[in-house]
Amino acid sequence: MHPVSQAESSGVLIHPLFLGMRGCPGRCVYCDQDKLSGSSGYDLEESVARVREFVRHHPEREKQVAFYGGTFTAWERDSREKLLRGVSEVCDARTSFRISTHPLYVSEEILAWCKNWNIRTIELGIQDFNPEVLALSGRGYSGQEALEAAYRVKKQGFELGIQLMPGLPGWSEASLEENRRILAELKPDLLRLYPLIVIRGTALEQLFNSGEYFPLSLEEAITQCADYYPVARRAGFRIIKLGIPSNIDPAEIAGGPWHPAFGELVKAELAARKVLAIDPQEQAVTLSRDEIRLLKAHGGAALQKVQDWFEQHS
Ligand code: SF4
């Protein structure tokens, strides 16, 4: 499968390259990067050729080549430098790099290395800031370490992205509140929300089959993701991804809140909340054409919610 270039809401054009699990200190119980990216490998020459085309087609645009999957800064240095050197040779002055990595691999020394290699955006796969959730998920770091890593990246002037994973074992209303509070204080630039789904062949599937892991329902995942929007609005960061990449074959999903248009379901929930926030006797609300489309889309569950609410309140 060939990765496609995509425009982020900031207007920067992103060209993703998937690196599988290169550099990962272990295999997280829920992870299968090949299935998530829809790709089974990475080839340096092919990657460089794709980047060359990407850069050639968009000379006027601000661009980033994004290295996703794996733990970029824990990958052996020679390999990552070989990749960056190869890709840099075909980039123009409007192209920088974005990486996704693990919070334990962003020391001051590594961040200095990142600056030298034109890396402008660092996304940290933190998944949750709550210590109990992190321990139960075997992530190998504490909430405090995750937070310190995020502040270090920010302080060094990188664009900071945080990836969270609603639905990890041990989550609670208190842990959700803690995540929202920390994000409000941290003020990252970007947030991705990947509600946890159960991929076939992972250790999580065994826990799911034996009844030791209960995934979120689709509705719970939508609610939890929608709850981050008011925080993002107040703290001034962008939510750039909702749900796991849609490249996955649905047959590979054993359970959990997966939907091919998960992001639209969250946005429909936000449109419904806009209506539900008014006093129908006293106030009116204006919805955009897109919000109305979202309310009606995917079976119209959000519209039904609004209609039920009006019936109860009129
Ligand atoms: S660190 Fe990230 S890419 Fe690596 S196994 Fe864990 S979730 Fe997958």
Image (cartoon, rainbow, N blue to C red):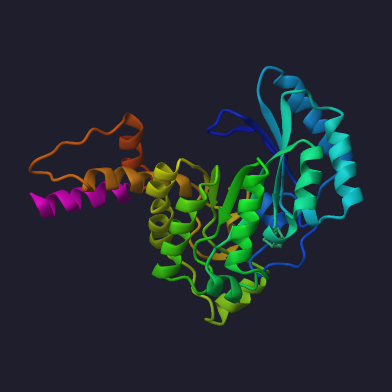
In this view, the residue in front, 221 or 85, is 85
Residue 94, compared with residue 131, is above or below; it is above
* Side (left or right) of 240 relative to 25: left
Q: Quadrant of residue 282?
A: top left
Quadrant for ligand 1?
bottom right
Q: Is residue 156 visible?
A: yes
Q: Would you identify the image quadrant in which residue 286 lies?
A: top left
In the image, residue 239 lies at what x, y percent?
Answer: 50, 44
- x 44%, y 57%: residue: 180
Residue 181 horizontal/vertical position (percent): 44, 58
Q: Is residue 264 magenta?
A: no
Q: How many marks?
A: 0
- Image x and y of residue 58, in percent: 70, 21
Classified by dominant secondary structure, the portion drawn in magenta counts as helix
The magenta span reads: 300-314
Q: Is residue 234 above or below residue 179?
A: above
Residue at horizontal 76 percent and vertical 68 percent from the top: 26
Looking at this view, is 18 or 92 the one in front?
92
Does 186 sit above or below residue 253?
Answer: above
Residue plotted at (36% across, 42% down): 297
Q: Residue at x 41, y 55 (%)?
A: 222
**Which residue is more in the foreground, 178 or 225?**
178
Whether the magenta-drawn stretch holds residue 308 is answered as yes
